[in-house]
Image (tube, rainbow, N blue to C red):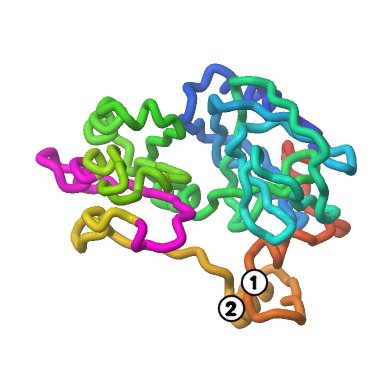
């Protein structure tokens, strides 16, 4: 079957996921894929429905997209930026300027988890962020995860009790900057994380996974970083030239001649998709 154009909302309807509970990922067991900046199609692992302030943006080239205020794009300096803060963002054809943002109020927004180890692209050609490391960690482990983006939910004990008692292996907290800061700075969430990681009830085989843009691990409450409680800290820094060469060799690309530090966005974000790609059952154009 040829690739067809489809919106995320229509994809949810197609997968009978329109009534999916917020912040829960429904695995996709069909041959459905999305085009990435490399020009290839990569399988969709799951779909996620969230509640957020919806924003419709329009760029100077006429591209439009409706997404959550916290949806992440890539800016002209190859940095991640929230939709509500973005001004210039990357697309498959280059850097574009956002000329309007329309606030659509609180409502459903949709996301996908993909298997590709790089950024992904929606039907309008804008380059979006993909929390690939976490999603692939869950996928490769064969386990399930509890995911929430709602501060009100995190402030209750119910989600932690359900995680301890349930079958989920991971509890995922993305963009957890405020949750990780020192209790001396007024962080009221840290005691919950400490109780789950080292409490009276066993949490063997379970892991709390945080993603954060804090400048340094020194900004994280020291109690959470103690040996035996913190399994590992993974820093996602720019690649060196030799590391970038390994990545480019694997996908048949050439490392830019200038510079000695490269993000994946700088290696893949400006690639034109002019070559032939494999056709999957359903895909985004």
- Could you tell me which residue is drawn at 29 percent across and 26 percent down? 156
Residue 201 on the magenta segment:
yes
Q: Which residue is mark 1?
A: 262
Percent x, y of residue 45 = 56, 41
- Could you tell me which residue is drawn at 29 percent across and 39 percent down? 189
Percent x, y of residue 61 = 89, 43
Whether label 1 touches label 2, CB < 8 Å: yes
Q: Give the magenta part as a residue range.
A: 194-219
Q: Looking at the image, can residue 40 be seen? A: yes
Q: Residues within 10 Å of mark 2 (few under 14, many from 20)?
A: few
Q: Looking at the image, can residue 2 be seen? A: no
Q: Residue furthest front?
A: 185
Quarter of the image for residue 55 reads top right
Horizontal arrangement in the rendering, residue 270 relative to residue 232 (left or right): right
The disc placed on residue 240 is 2
The answer to whether 117 is drawn above or below residue 3 in the figure is: below
Helix, strand or loop at mark 1 = strand
Image quarter where the N terminus lies is top right
Horizontal arrangement in the rendering, residue 251 relative to residue 197 (left or right): right
Quarter of the image for residue 52 reads top right
Percent x, y of residue 190 = 27, 43
Q: Residues within 10 Å of mark 1 (few under 14, many from 20)?
A: some
Taking depth in this image into account, of 134 and 53 the one nearest to the observer is: 53
Percent x, y of residue 171 = 35, 41
Residue 107 on the magenta segment:
no
- Could you tell me which residue is drawn at 49 percent across and 48 percent down? 135
Query: How far, Cα to Cα, is label 1 from label 2?
Result: 6 Å
- Could you tell me which residue is drawn at 46 percent across and 61 percent down? 215
The disc placed on residue 95 is none
Taking depth in this image into account, of 180 and 184 the one nearest to the observer is: 184
């Amino acid at each position: 079957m040829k690739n067809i154009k489809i919106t995320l909302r229509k994809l949810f309807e197609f997968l009978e996921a329109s009534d999916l509970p917020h912040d829960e990922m429904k695995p996709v067991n069909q041959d459905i894929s999305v085009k990435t900046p490399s020009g290839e199609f990569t399988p969709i692992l799951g779909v996620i429905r969230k509640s957020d302030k919806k924003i419709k943006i329009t760029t100077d080239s006429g591209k439009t997209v409706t997404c959550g205020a916290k949806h992440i794009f890539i800016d002209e300096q190859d940095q991640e930026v929230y939709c509500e803060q973005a001004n210039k963002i990357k697309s498959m054809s280059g850097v574009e300027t956002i000329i309007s943002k329309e606030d659509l109020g609180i409502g459903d927004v949709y996301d996908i988890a993909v298997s590709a180890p790089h950024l992904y692209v929606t039907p309008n050609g804008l380059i979006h962020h993909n929390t690939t490391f976490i999603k692939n960690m869950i996928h490769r482990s064969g386990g399930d995860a509890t995911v929430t983006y709602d501060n009100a939910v995190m402030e209750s004990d119910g989600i932690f009790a359900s995680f301890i008692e349930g079958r989920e292996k991971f509890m995922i907290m993305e963009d957890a900057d405020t949750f990780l800061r020192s209790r001396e700075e007024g962080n009221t969430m840290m005691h919950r994380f400490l109780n789950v990681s080292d409490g009276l009830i066993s949490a063997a085989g379970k892991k709390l996974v945080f993603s954060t843009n804090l400048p340094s691990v020194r900004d994280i409450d020291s109690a959470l970083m103690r040996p035996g409680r913190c399994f590992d800290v993974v820093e996602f820094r720019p690649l060196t030239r030799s590391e970038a060469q390994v990545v480019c060799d694997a996908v048949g690309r050439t490392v830019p001649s200038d510079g000695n530090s490269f993000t994946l966005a700088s290696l893949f974000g400006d690639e034109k998709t002019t070559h032939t790609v494999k056709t999957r059952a359903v895909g985004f154009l």
